[in-house]
């Protein structure tokens, strides 16, 4: 059977792919299962864990897009119109929506984030399928499987009784409780899993082939989304599975791709030399953590006032309460996030030449 590492479509190497892209879904689920009392039904985050999860993974991964866009002199030159237009469009749209209704701002941002999260898993599946030459039917089964892994838990979230967590804020997702459609969706979910399993077993028997990373990314997506949203009903469990499974692989993918490109680029800025040269991974991560801390510090100092012990340098900032000022400030603070979501739809397409 062709399943050894030489025959696998790794993005960087077997070891690094396993650690940083494929294992986070399984690791986060294992973490939740080992400590059920702390994770499965808890809403309270230990402060240190909150900083690690939200600031150093969730917020930090947003800024990794910079290395493929604004920090990359060649891409910035080639795509300057797009890279200037998108944040301007996102900010103006955000201000208009927030002035209309603050909840609608968070709702649109939540659904934009969900789309981004779903497409990331599909993108990884496609990357790990890039060397396969199968029929349209077989490749369609893979696509349907990866989308089912994400969409069924979201359908469950929208149609079932109350979940003890949200994406950004209470009420950001619509609720349409419908037990009949939920039951039909559950049957379809199981059927698609069975069809995918049969397809893989048939391929193994007939062709003696097993695509390890593609199967692991699909399995990890099924497990992390199902257990995070459907099986467990706790904020810590959901956030752990959601953030770790998404943020770490995304940062790793940026690092893998940009590290390879760096060797071929003629013009290299000092920043890129620092982040992709000797000890580059250290600087790559440090810059992400610094940006994340600064952004979250502004949120806490100006909006939330919830973790002032962590963000002491920002504790002197006045809390903004006026609706007009909030409609300008909140979309501005959220701009790195919205820009990240929108840009991500462009920077991985071959035709856009990033």
Image (cartoon, grey):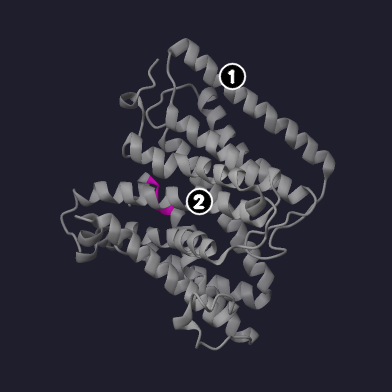
Residue 95 is left or right of residue 52, and the answer is right
Q: Residue at x 51, y 59 (%)?
A: 53
> Which percent across, then down, holds residue 306?
59, 76
Q: Is residue 350 above or below residue 183?
A: below
**Range covered by the magenta-colored residues:** 345-349
Q: Are marks 2 and 1 in contact (CB under 8 Å)?
A: no
192 in the magenta segment: no
> Which percent across, then down, holds residue 329?
54, 80
N-terminal of the two: label 2 or label 1? 1
Q: Which mark is residue 244?
A: 2
Query: Is residue 115 something one can see in this rendering?
Result: no
Q: Residue at x 84, y 39 (%)?
A: 180
Q: Is residue 353 above or below residue 319?
A: above
Crowding at dot 1, Cα within 10 Å, few <14 / some 14-19 / many 20+, comes out as few
Q: Which mark is residue 215?
A: none
Give how far apart the Cα atoms at labels 2 and 1 are: 30 Å
Residue 217 is left or right of residue 110, and the answer is left
Residue 17 is left or right of residue 164, and the answer is left
Image quadrant where one finds the N terminus: top left
Dominant secondary structure (helix, strand or loop) of the stretch shown in magenta:
helix
Q: Which mark is residue 198?
A: 1
Q: Residue at x 68, y 62 (%)?
A: 172
Crowding at dot 2, Cα within 10 Å, few <14 / some 14-19 / many 20+, comes out as many
Which residue is at the far left? 266
> Which percent across, then down, holds residue 307?
55, 75
Residue 326 is left or right of residue 249, and the answer is right
Q: 316 or 269: which is nearer to us?
A: 316
346 in the magenta segment: yes
Q: Is residue 306 above or below residue 127?
A: below
Query: Is residue 15 something one can see in this rendering?
Result: yes
Which numbered disc, 2 or 1, marks the residue closer to the eye? 2
């Amino acid at each position: 059977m062709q399943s050894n590492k030489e025959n696998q479509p790794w993005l960087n190497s077997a070891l690094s792919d396993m650690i940083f892209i494929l294992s986070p879904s399984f690791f986060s689920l294992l973490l939740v299962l080992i400590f059920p009392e702390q994770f499965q039904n808890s809403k309270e985050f230990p402060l240190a864990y909150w900083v690690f999860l939200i600031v150093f993974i969730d917020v930090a991964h947003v800024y990794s897009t910079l290395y493929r866009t604004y920090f990359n002199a060649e891409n910035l030159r080639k795509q300057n119109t797009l890279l200037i237009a998108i944040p301007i469009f996102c900010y103006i749209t955000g201000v208009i929506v927030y002035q209309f209704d603050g909840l609608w701002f968070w709702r649109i941002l939540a659904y934009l984030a969900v789309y981004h999260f779903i497409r990331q898993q599909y993108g990884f599946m496609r990357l790990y399928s890039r060397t396969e030459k199968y029929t349209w039917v077989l490749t369609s089964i893979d696509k349907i499987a990866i989308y089912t892994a994400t969409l069924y838990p979201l359908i469950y979230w929208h149609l079932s009784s109350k979940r003890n967590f949200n994406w950004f804020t209470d009420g950001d997702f619509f609720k349409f409780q419908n037990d009949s459609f939920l039951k039909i969706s559950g049957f379809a979910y199981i059927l698609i899993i069975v069809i995918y399993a049969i397809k893989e077993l048939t391929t193994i028997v007939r062709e003696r082939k097993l695509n390890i990373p593609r199967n692991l990314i699909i399995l990890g997506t099924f497990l992390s989304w199902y257990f995070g949203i459907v099986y467990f009903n706790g904020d810590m469990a959901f956030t752990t599975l959601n953030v770790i499974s998404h943020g770490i692989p995304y940062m790793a993918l940026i690092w893998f791709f940009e590290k390879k490109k760096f060797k071929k680029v003629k013009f290299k800025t000092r920043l890129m030399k620092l982040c992709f040269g000797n000890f580059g991974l250290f600087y790559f991560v440090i810059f992400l953590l610094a940006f994340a801390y600064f952004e979250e510090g502004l949120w806490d100092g100006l909006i939330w006032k919830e973790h002032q012990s962590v963000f002491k340098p920002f504790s002197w900032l006045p809390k903004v309460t006026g609706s007009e000022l909030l409609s300008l400030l909140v979309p501005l603070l959220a701009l790195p996030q919205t820009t990240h979501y929108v840009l991500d739809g462009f920077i991985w397409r071959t035709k856009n030449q990033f």
